[in-house]
Each structure stands twice: as C-alpha cells, then as structure tokens.
Amino acid sequence: MDQIEHRLRGLMLAGLAGEAGPYRQLLDELARLLRAYYARRAPPGLDAEDLVQETLIAVHTRRATYDAGQPFTAWAYAIARYKLIDALRRARLHLRSPIEAADDLFVPPGAEAAMASRDLDRALAALPARTQALIRDTRIAGLSTREAAARAGISEGAAKVAIHRGLKALGEQYGGSDVADD
C-alpha cells in the first residue's frame, strides 16, 4: 500500500502544480481503486459507478484543500467514505459489512494516525502556542506537568493553569464540559 500511497501522492502533487497528464493519471488510478472499494461496500440499489463519479468530482473540486504533508489516500478515502454515507442516507439503505472494514482496502497503515494528528492540529490551532505545547507534552507525550513546565521555561503552577484553561477552551469548543485536573 505504501507504493500506491507514494504514487498517488506524487501524481496529486504534480496535478496541483498544474501538470495535466499526471493529474489525469491520478483520476484514472483513483477511479479504479474507487470501483473496487464501492463494489465491495455499496448495497444493491446504489450504483457504484455513480459513487465513483461523485467522488472523483469531489476530489477535483476540493483538491486545493489537500494538505501535502498528509497521506493522499487518507484524504481521498475520507471523501469516498462520506460520499458512500451520503448515498446510503439518501437511499435509506444499510451496508452489507461495517464501514470500518474499508480501512484495510483503501487506507494505508498509519493513515488513521495521520488523520487523528491532523484533527488534533486543527483543534489545538485556536490555542496559544505555549498552551498547545504544554497540552501536547502532558497529554500526548506523557511528560509530567513539572517536566513540561521546565521545557516551556515557566513555573509548574503557570503550566497547570495554562493546561487547564486550554483544555477547558477545547471542551467548550467541542462540546465537552469535564476537564481532568492535574
């Protein structure tokens, strides 16, 4: 799968740089992968070819949103998954197998972690840089508050306050209300 990721990502980057040939090749290869994906997932009543075309159109219209630092297949898979879910909702149909199994077909190993990292980056972006670093150090890297404070060059008490306020702001923004105390 790494070869597919590397190839498709390269074609996408060339397409974003304005090269028509590689971009056309990307859409052709992606169409082939999408046909296999939808053939296994789309229940009777949904036209897999329509889903392929809708997904290719979405990839084309949203190509400017692709973050070159992230895996291409994860980005394309997310679009395909949402297109399938939308079609199922419109048709009021159900899947033959769980959507989570699609990861093995289309998403390379580590893509889920990359998507989670991207989502975390977006969530933390609203916080001050020092608060972001403190939250990452204590909640993700596993450092103690004292270690994170020393790394940031502030007192442990100031670090606790910053972490608490940052987590509280995230909780308010994303619907949570409980903030774990240090």
Image: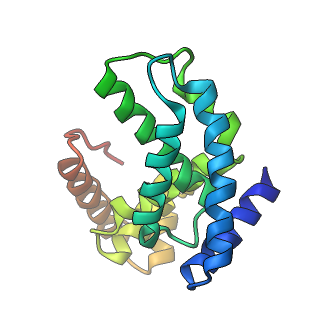
Q: Please tell me in which quadrant of the rendered image residue 166 appears.
A: bottom left
Please count the marks in the image. 0
In the image, residue 36 above or below residue 9: above
Q: Please tell me in which quadrant of the rendered image residue 181 appears.
A: top left
Nearer the observer, 56 or 162: 56
- The reply to whether residue 22 is visible in this rendering is yes
Indicate the position of residue 103 as horizontal and vertical percent values. 63, 36
Nearer the observer, 106 or 31: 31
In the image, residue 86 above or below residue 54: above
Indicate the position of residue 147 as horizontal and vertical percent values. 52, 65
In the image, residue 151 above or below residue 54: below
Indicate the position of residue 60 as horizontal and vertical percent values. 46, 64
* Image-based side of 37 in relation to 159, left or right: right
Look at 61% across and 79% down and name the residue there: 20
Indicate the position of residue 101 as horizontal and vertical percent values. 62, 27
* Image-based side of 33 in relation to 178, left or right: right
Look at 76% across and 65% down and name the residue there: 7
- The reply to whether residue 103 is visible in this rendering is no
